Amino acid sequence: MSGNSPIILLYHQVSPNKTTFIENYNINVEPNLFDSHMKILKEEYAPITFDEWNDAIKNNDDVSNRVLVMSLTMVLRF
């Protein structure tokens, strides 16, 4: 990666239950696995917001060095 291209992750659903939204695809991540992902990402990457990424693009800042943008579309309480 170079320039203004951070890693972008999308988690659709974090829940102990299998998804019923799309029957043929398990787009769910179980909470314990999600926690493990977050611990690794916190240690290895520098998260930024979409607004910070947008600012970096405008300012031509390099955000490629272990930078991460993450989106959660649905997190269920359990």
Image (cartoon, rainbow, N blue to C red):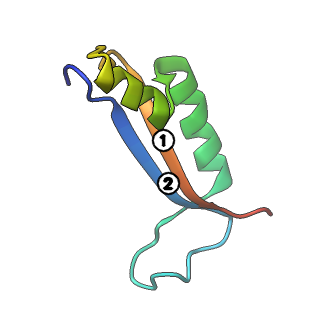
Circle 1: residue type: Met
N-term mark: 2 or 1: 2
Q: Which residue is mark 1?
A: 70
Q: Position of residue 23 (x, y in %)?
A: 45, 85
Classify mark 1: residues with Cα within 10 Å, few (<14), some (14-19) or many (20+): some
**Quadrant of the frame with the N terminus:** top left
Q: Which residue is mark 2?
A: 11
- Identify the element where label 1 is drawn: strand
Find residue 62 and report its image quarter.
top left
From this view, report whether residue 21 is shown above or below residue 12. below
From this view, report whether residue 37 is shown above or below residue 61. below
Number of callouts: 2
- Identify the element where label 2 is drawn: strand
Farthest front residue?
58
Q: Position of residue 29 (x, y in %)?
A: 55, 58
Classify mark 2: residues with Cα within 10 Å, few (<14), some (14-19) or many (20+): some
Q: Is residue 57 left or right of residue 74?
A: left
What residue is rendered at 33% in x and 29% in y?
A: 6
Residue 50's disc is none
Circle 2: residue type: Tyr
Q: Position of residue 70 (x, y in %)?
A: 48, 41
Compare residues 62 and 57 and report the one nearer the observer: 57
Find residue 63 and report its image quarter.
top left
Compare residues 54 and 68 and report the one nearer the observer: 54
Q: Position of residue 77 (x, y in %)?
A: 78, 62
**Quadrant of the frame with the C terminus:** bottom right
What residue is rendered at 60% in x and 29% in y?
A: 39
From this view, report whether residue 8 is shown above or below residue 59. below
CB under 8 Å between discs 2 and 1 = yes
Compare residues 4 and 7 and report the one nearer the observer: 4
Compare residues 17 and 9 and report the one nearer the observer: 9
